[in-house]
């Protein structure tokens, strides 16, 4: 079994707690940030607010993190680790038994919406940060997910896999992720991240788009 918060080992600006009490304090601080970022932009969340929400002192914060920047990077690191595990679980689930195309897409959109909802604040802050400085810690992992998911979905298509179909599936993923980004940045839209109808409409749109007749593209 991995030690607690092992994903943060070697993380710049982070000092791992040596005792269980320090670990509890660190977890409370991290949870405080996840909760506050659901309601407030990162630049409006202060270290004092984080500590007050976690019911710890600012000294406790600085004994774990050297700045708010390193603290937010730690939050991103943990979310990335959870995303990596979630992606592996989805791929394993796709490989675990025979799926119908519609059923598989419903599973993928459900898990994607739930994951985005659980990490809403950190993901929104990351998107806003990317717009300012171009830093995107999630890009490569998302690309790796596409490389694994696209051929598996293509094999479930009634028409059989083809380069044209795989291209269409990639674009359908892009549409789905754009829908989630809109919901994250705008705190909703027609459907919020906590609304199951969002996943249902994403699955419906995904299915209808990739099952339309594939026409030969003209140069």
Image: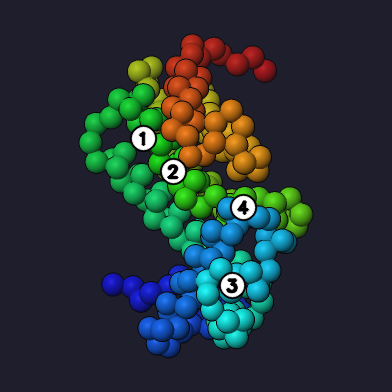
> Most extreme residue toward the bottom, as rendered?
18
In the picture of the structure, the residue carrying the numbered disc 3 is 52
Q: Nearer the viewer, mark 3 or mark 1?
A: 3
Q: Nearer the viewer, mark 2 or mark 4?
A: 4
In this view of the protein, which residue sits in the foreground, 59 or 80?
Answer: 59
Measured in 3D between alpha carbons, the distance from the residue under mark 3 to the one under mark 4, in whole angstroms, is 16 Å
Q: Position of residue 73 (x, y in %)?
A: 60, 67
- Tell me the crowding category of disc 1: few under 14, some 14 to 19, or many 20 or more residues within 10 angstroms, Cα based: some
Measured in 3D between alpha carbons, the distance from the residue under mark 1 to the one under mark 2, in whole angstroms, is 11 Å
In the picture of the structure, the residue carrying the numbered disc 2 is 114
Q: Quadrant for residue 74, please give it.
A: bottom right
- In terms of sequence position, does the residue under pointer 2 or pointer 3 come before the other? 3
Residue at 48%, 82% in the rendered image: 16
Residue 43: numbered disc: none
Residue 210, visible in the rendered structure: no
Measured in 3D between alpha carbons, the distance from the residue under mark 1 to the one under mark 4, in whole angstroms, is 28 Å
Q: Nearer the viewer, mark 2 or mark 3?
A: 3
- In terms of sequence position, does the residue under pointer 1 or pointer 2 come before the other? 1
Residue at 62%, 41% in the rendered image: 187
* Mark 1 element type: helix
- In terms of sequence position, does the residue under pointer 3 or pointer 4 come before the other? 4
Measured in 3D between alpha carbons, the distance from the residue under mark 3 to the one under mark 1, in whole angstroms, is 39 Å
Q: Position of residue 62 (x, y in %)?
A: 61, 83
Q: Quadrant for residue 4, please give it.
A: bottom left
188 left or right of 7 in image:
right
Q: Nearer the viewer, mark 3 or mark 4?
A: 3
Q: Position of residue 11 (x, y in %)?
A: 55, 75
- In terms of sequence position, does the residue under pointer 3 or pointer 1 come before the other? 3
* Mark 2 element type: helix
In the picture of the structure, the residue carrying the numbered disc 4 is 39
């Amino acid at each position: 079994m991995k030690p607690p918060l092992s994903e943060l080992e070697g993380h710049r600006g982070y000092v791992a707690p040596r005792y269980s009490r320090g670990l509890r304090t660190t977890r409370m601080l991290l949870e405080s940030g996840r909760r506050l970022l659901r309601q407030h932009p990162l630049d409006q969340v202060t270290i004092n607010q984080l500590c007050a929400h976690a019911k710890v002192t600012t000294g406790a914060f600085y004994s774990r993190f050297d700045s708010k920047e390193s603290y937010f990077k730690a939050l991103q690191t943990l979310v990335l680790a959870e995303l990596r595990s979630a992606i592996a679980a989805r791929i394993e689930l796709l490989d675990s038994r025979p799926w119908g195309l519609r059923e598989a897409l419903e599973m993928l959109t459900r898990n994607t919406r739930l994951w985005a909802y659980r990490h809403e604040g950190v993901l929104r802050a990351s998107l806003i940060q990317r717009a300012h400085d171009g830093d995107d810690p999630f890009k490569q992992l998302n690309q790796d997910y596409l490389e694994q998911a696209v051929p598996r979905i293509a094999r479930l298509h009634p028409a059989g896999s083809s380069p044209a179909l795989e291209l269409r599936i990639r674009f359908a993923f892009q549409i789905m992720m754009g829908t989630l980004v809109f919901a994250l940045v705008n705190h909703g839209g027609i459907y919020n991240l906590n609304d199951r109808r969002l996943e249902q409409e994403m699955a419906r749109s995904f299915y209808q788009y990739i099952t339309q007749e594939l026409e030969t593209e003209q140069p």
